[in-house]
Amino acid sequence: MAPSNPASGSARKVAGLASDGTNEAERKQSEQAMAKMQDFLKGYAPTHFKHEKDLVQGRYHVNLSRAIPEFDTEFTRAYEATDPTEPGKHFFAKICEPARVQRWRVLENFQHIEHRAVIQIKAVGPVLLSAGNQERLAVVYEQPLGRKLSELVKSRKISGNPHYLLEHILIPIITGLEHFTQLDISHGLINPDNVYYDEQTAILGPCASEPCGFAQPFMFESLERMQAHPAGKGEGSTLHDYYALAVLLLYILHGPDHFSGFTPEALMFHILKDGAYHTLMRDKEVPEIFYDFLRGTLTQSPEDRWTDKQLKAWLGGKRYNVLPPPTPADAVRPFEFKDILVNNRRELAHLFAQDWLHMLHAIQGATLSHWVTVSLRNKELADQVSRLCRNALEAAGKNDILTSEMLMNIVLLLDQIGPLRIRQIALHVEGINTMFAEMYVQKNTVELQFLAKFVETNMINYWVTMQEKRKPDFEISERLNELIQKLDRLRNCIRNSGFGFGLERVLYDLNADMPCQSEIFENSYVKTLPQLLKHLDKIATNFTGDDIVDRHVAAFIASKLQIQNEIRLNEISSIPALATSRNMVALYLLAMVQERVEPMRLPGLTHWFSLRLLPLMDSIHSKTLRQKMKTMIANMAPLGLLQKMADLMITADYAEADSNGFEKALEQYRRNAAEIISLKQPERLERDTHKMGLNMATLLAYSGLLFSVMYIIRGFTS
């Protein structure tokens, strides 16, 4: 066995002089400081939270023992609410799930709508529930008078007189929706179970506590929204509300049995074949006064649908004499797909999207492009279809993502009104935020990965191109332009798996109003950075884990602060144990937050970090510097200022000084070790022994000679 080289472990041995904690006094001093910090945390009671339980905005009391199921939805529960200042009024509070997206833009604008046909929002804010000590978002509404239209229709307690329905149902709702149009929002939940009637007027029920249209029954959605996933319909516009209102009118006129027997797939199939108007009318007569309204709103394409301008004129007495729309057959000859004869391109797109495997077989050869050329008489479209088919077939079996993208584009080419459809996913562009959130919460990994690839490969560009070709006057709205820019920035976030990035970052960037989904906030509602700091300061009192800032908290912060690059603590890179510590990165992030928000002291957090940072100081080699840093950390903890602690910990001064001193000590150690090795070599020992012997012999000879000379001289003198 070769002899060991003492120099090879020199760094470890030199470092060990510091990090082994050989100084017992230093160890005891550190233990005493940490024990003092632990005692502080045990007795610390933050003063950030002053709200009472079951109270919204300090005014509306939620009575959890009085549930009101008629206002429940899949993601919300309703309870009686009271206001001491208005004892004669009835309110209810919808308690929202923290993992679901609320329509904040609608909530904020809804409060400015004061109309007799629109339910009134009285308050929006977090509430600390006495049941389970959980903090949740609450939306307080003034309880509408009257009963649901669904109950009145079933019991036949509402008049079918057309003028009565026009005066008491259509006019109030349409004039109420005018406010939505002006605010550029939609209702999205107009159906018999969410419209109330009090013998005077119809009243639209609540709609903003979940993604737009999520709970809307399928028969009240237009085809393009029905085809999308409930969470991916997007915000839409009042055009969809007018469509739902027309279906509601048919429900009142013909009763609930009018829609019996329809499943979502069956209804979509009939609308694609016969058109929305003919499918929903079902060959039944309606009063002539409603002809224009129904024909103007139950259109196949949203571009042809009546807007508030036509509706306002119609309510004013103008009659358009709209003709019944024709069936949507735009092909000279049908296209056969899975034994189904298809007569229009939207129907074919729908069938393709339902069965991607057979779609691959159907696009082989030139059958599809030939059909588009001959039957649809659209050469330009045929050339585009041919190119996409060729690309899809070339990628098949090699690149699944590229194949799916090409197939998605073929479906989009055939149906430029419908949702984007890729594999199991169907969504409108504006619904990508709520769709992503739903897939993330439901842990639908496959769909989530496809959505991530949709963002990463910038598939939205093809959709924008199609819209520009379809509508010469197409203009990207401010909201859509903002979304496109956001998606472009997110491409790097998806590719970056670092702290503050990845899928969690995409979640918060797409859903800026979504509360932080970290497990440590399971019973808290954290929507803003100040709320995050206050809750972390409270949690720090009994949090025993090592990472108080997990991937969700880091992504939430990075999203709010718009951090675009991965955080690297280069200033202290000379001490790897510090530079790579998650708690050091967490301290850096939270210090940035505290610097940006309202002034507040967070002694709970600073003590928690101090407990984790003190042991890290053992990575410092210099005993003097190590003790100095530990003392400064202990003195800073009571201040509650994360910025000052970060300034101390994440600077180049102490790390560079310690590194330089350590390098000098290491170099001296190496020189000494090399000298020892050289001295222990056998050849060197023999040479040195021989040299020493010669030197000793020479010394003895000279000594004897000197002695002899002195003896002789003494003899002569005597």
Image (tube, rainbow, N blue to C red):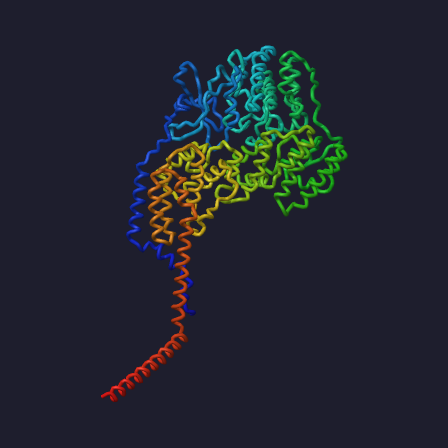
Q: Which of 654 and 307 is in front in this view?
A: 654
- Residue drawn at x 39%, y 65% is 672
Residues 676 and 199: in front is: 676
Quadrant in which the C terminus is drawn: bottom left
Judge from the rendering whether residue 436 lies leftward or rightward of residue 696; answer left or right: right
Q: Can residue 713 be seen in this view?
A: yes
Residue 578 at x, y = what percent? 42, 49
* In-front residue for pair 347/283: 347
Horizontal and vertical percent position of residue 704: 30, 84
What number of labels is visible?
A: 0
Q: Can residue 151 be seen in this view?
A: no
Quarter in which the N terminus is drawn = bottom left
Image quadrant where residue 682 sits: bottom left
Q: In this view, does 648 lie above or below 222?
A: below
The residue located at (27%, 86%) in the rendering is: 713
Query: Does residue 358 appear left or right of residue 212 in this picture?
Result: right
Task: Answer left or right for 247 relative to 695.
Answer: right
- x and y percent of residue 565 in the render? 52, 43
Identified at 56% across, 25% down, the residue is: 217
Q: Residue furthest front?
A: 717
**88 horizontally vs 233: left or right:** left
* 561 is higher (above) or lower (below) than 51: below
Q: Which residue is drawn at 60% across and 41% down?
A: 457
Image position of 45 with respect to 173: above or below: below
Q: Where is residue 18 in the image (x, y as percent from the top left)?
A: 35, 55
| Res. 683 image quadrant | bottom left
> Quick one: which residue is furthest to the left in this view?
718
